[in-house]
Every structure is written in C-alpha cells, then in structure tokens.
C-alpha cells in the first residue's frame, strides 16, 4: 500500500505523498500496529467546521479553520489535515491545504470543505476599507415629515420607531 502511494512501484495512478510526509508516517504506524479495523468504527455521523464563518477586519489577515468529525461510537477527532479545502473566489480569499484562510481583498466568498463525500461551506467576509478622509454624508431634515436619507438617520429624527 505504501509503495504504491509513494510512487515506488509502477501503477496507473498518481503519487499521493512522499516517504517523508506525515501521511506516510501515519499509515506506516497504523500498519505496524496491526492495521486494526472494526466494521463501522470509522462511520462518520457528523462533521463540523469551526468557526462556521470567517469575518476579517481587513485584507491580509488570516484565520485557521478546524474540522471535527463525530464517529458512530461517539468519539470526536480533529480531521482538518484529512480534508480538502477550496475557495469559490480566489481573488477574495485563499485557503491552504491545512485550512489556513487568508483575506486578500474586500468581498465575500465561501471556502468549501470536503471530507469523505461531505461538503461544508464556510462564509468568508472581507470588508471594504474606506479611503483616508472618507466621510458618510450628513443627514439633513427635509421639509417633509420624513428625512430623505438612510433609515439609520430617519431613526435619529424619530421617523422610524422600534417595533
């Protein structure tokens, strides 16, 4: 199994990982321990991504996603390293193969997390940073009973009341 996965024997597939990788070490240790397996022991009942949403304050910031699987026997494990991560818009955010998200420019996108056929989206928000000196327009009262401005200004003038 390890020879094929590391490309040391000819086969039709691709090389999956190298002999020095954590994947190789993990599989080798499992095989050395007797490759124990109980039917149903690996059945996944739930997968969660934490945090469920990444809201950055500015481009350039990073945040780590963590993926946790709950198995049929009730055990929970961090499976982040075994997941596939993809971004829907690589101009807004990028994601590493270990779930590190980096905000690149203002916008919103989704990071898609895939584990054993389960697909989970994580919303990513990167706000627009106002230009230096930018000011929102002043809210002025019009001659009518309702101000001609945004609802937040209308609330200041009593035109909108909380329900």
Image (cartoon, helix red, strand yellow):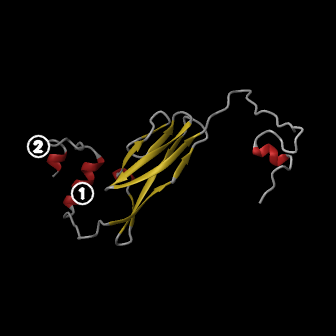
Residue 143 location (% of width, % of height): 90, 38
User: Which one is nearer the viewer's eye here, 93 or 82?
Assistant: 93
User: Which one is nearer the viewer's eye here, 20 or 97?
Assistant: 97
Report whether 105 appears left or right of 145: left
Numbered disc 2: secondary structure: loop
Residue at the image point whose x is 79% and y is 57% from the top: 162
Instruction: Spot the residue most to the left.
Output: 10
Res 29 label? 1
- Give neighbour class at mark 1: few <14, some 14-19, many 20+ (Cα, 10 Å): few
User: Which one is nearer the viewer's eye here, 108 or 82?
Assistant: 108
Numbered disc 1: secondary structure: helix
Residue 156 location (% of width, % of height): 84, 47
Q: Is residue 116 above or below residue 104?
A: below
Residue at the image point whose x is 22% and y is 67% from the top: 37
Look at the image and tell me in which quarter the C terminus lies: bottom right
In terms of sequence position, does the residue under pointer 1 or pointer 2 come before the other?
Answer: 2
Instruction: Spot the residue most to the front.
Output: 144
Residue 112 location (% of width, % of height): 41, 47
Q: Is residue 27 above or below residue 16?
A: below
- Give neighbour class at mark 2: few <14, some 14-19, many 20+ (Cα, 10 Å): few
Report whether 146 appears left or right of 59: right
Disc number lying in front (1 or 2): 2
The residue that label 2 is drawn on is 11
Report whether 114 appears left or right of 52: left
Report whether 17 appears left or right of 87: left
Instruction: Tally the numbered discs.
Output: 2
Question: Disc 1 vs disc 2: Cβ atoms closer than 8 Å?
Answer: no
Q: Is residue 41 above or below residue 20?
A: below
């Amino acid at each position: 199994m390890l020879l094929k996965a590391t490309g040391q024997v000819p086969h039709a597939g691709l090389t999956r990982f190298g002999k020095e990788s954590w994947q190789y070490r993990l599989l080798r240790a499992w095989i050395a321990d007797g490759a124990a397996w109980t039917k149903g022991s690996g059945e996944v009942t739930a997968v969660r991504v934490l945090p469920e949403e990444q809201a950055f304050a500015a481009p350039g910031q990073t945040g780590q996603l963590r993926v946790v699987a709950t198995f049929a026997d009730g055990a929970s494990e961090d499976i982040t390293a075994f997941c596939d991560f993809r971004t829907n818009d690589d101009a807004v955010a990028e994601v590493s193969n270990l779930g590190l998200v980096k905000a690149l420019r203002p916008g919103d996108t989704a990071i898609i997390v895939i584990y054993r056929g389960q697909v989970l989206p994580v919303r990513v928000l990167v706000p627009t940073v106002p230009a230096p000196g930018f000011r929102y327009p002043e809210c002025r009262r019009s001659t009518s009973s309702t101000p001609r401005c945004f609802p937040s200004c209308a609330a200041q003038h009593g035109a909108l009341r909380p329900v």
